[in-house]
Amino acid sequence: MRKEDPISPCFTDVLALLQALSRDWQMKMVPLSGGADTYKGKYRAMARRKLIAGNWKMNGHLDSLRELHGIEKAAKSHPQVDVAICPPATLIAAAVARVPGLAIGAQDCHSADKGAHTGCLSAPMLREAGAHYVIVGHSERRADQGETDEDVRAKAEAAHRHGLTAIVCVGETEEERDAGTAEAVVTAQIAGSVPAGATAEWLIVAYEPVWAIGTGRVPTLDDVLAMHTAIRAKLVESIGDEAEGVRILYGGSMNGSNAAELLAVPNVDGGLVGGASLSTDKFVPIIEAGATLA
Ligand code: PEP
């Protein structure tokens, strides 16, 4: 890992080759129902739309919603990418009313639909408030609330039961990366947190190295490539062919300056953005970077 993330010459060559190949695959696209099995995986991979999702965490009040107008406008100008904002739950209904053209998400849900769980919110409540997405298993919740992979999986299942798309977060700590266990940790989180039978329609994965969140540090592009490739392989093991369509977002200090190169890495299907999603000025360039690559 390093503080800045210049593209290594080796990565540039690999990326150029993969981009050329992907252009070729796009030209060969055939409908999935067309039975062109050889190209099925590649076609579906190319069909993944980028998602740029903002996570406001415990930030924002009613007056912060003014930032959403510019974000909604950018989302409408770039229909080739999906855009979502996950504000605190107190703002979901107000955000939906204020910017009906922008997808709104939540930052957590309980695994039960209702009951004696003071202070918690269920998936049906969030859906009723107008949310379309819900982040589950963010590392801050895994650390602060002690959420386990099993908890995260149950939350993702609850999201699905109520028509929400679950964004399941995984990521290693700095100690785990330094110990050389990052890939083992993350793939074990995938195995434990992704519900059996999940489909690309309602499951999104976000790879967020814990040490990159809010720190201004990002992994090298080679490391991002290696981890997203490993996550895709683990998803194939867990949910089979459906894994090809599941979007894998990168999260951790993404901003307007590094978004284009991060989003160009194969198997990076979008970004989960914390700090830079709080203002229109910082978030819109990330949407634009995603749109350029779409
Ligand atoms: C996050 O917490 O989901 C996140 C990616 O934060 P930041 O962009 O601020 O690193």
Image (cartoon, rainbow, N blue to C red):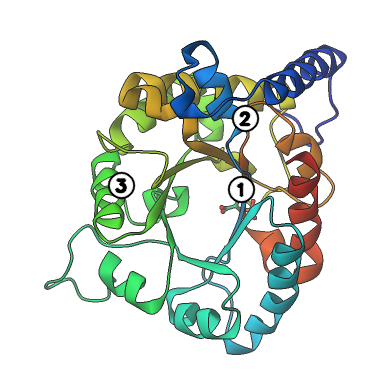
Percent position of residue 105, x then y: 47, 65
SS state under label 1:
loop
Q: Quadrant of residue 85?
A: bottom right
User: Under 8 Å from ligand 1: the CB of mark 1?
Assistant: yes
Percent position of residue 257, x then y: 85, 47
Instruction: Point out the tag, 2 or 1, that comes first from the N-terminus.
Output: 2
**In this figure, which residue is indicated by the disc labeled 2?**
46
Q: Which numbered tag is attached to residue 213?
A: 1
SS state under label 3:
helix
Nearer to us of marks 2 and 3 is 2
Percent position of residue 118, x then y: 21, 76
What type is the residue that disc 1 sits on? Ile
Nearer to us of marks 2 and 1 is 2
Residue 87, above or below 213: below
Residue 169, above or below 9: below
Q: Which residue is found at the position 76% from the left and 23% from the top?
A: 23
What type is the residue that disc 2 sits on? Met
Q: Evaluate whether residue 257 shows in this view.
A: yes
Nearer to us of marks 1 and 3 is 3
Placement of the C terminus among the 4 image quadrants: top right
Q: Is residue 226 left or right of residue 112?
A: right
Q: Quadrant of residue 95?
A: bottom right
Residue 153, above or below 268: below
**In this figure, which residue is indicated by the disc labeled 3?**
152
What type is the residue that disc 3 sits on? Val
- Classify mark 2: residues with Cα within 10 Å, few (<14), some (14-19) or many (20+): some
Measure the alpha-carbon separation of dots 1 and 3. Answer: 19 Å
Instruction: Point out the tag, 1 or 3, that comes first from the N-terminus.
Output: 3
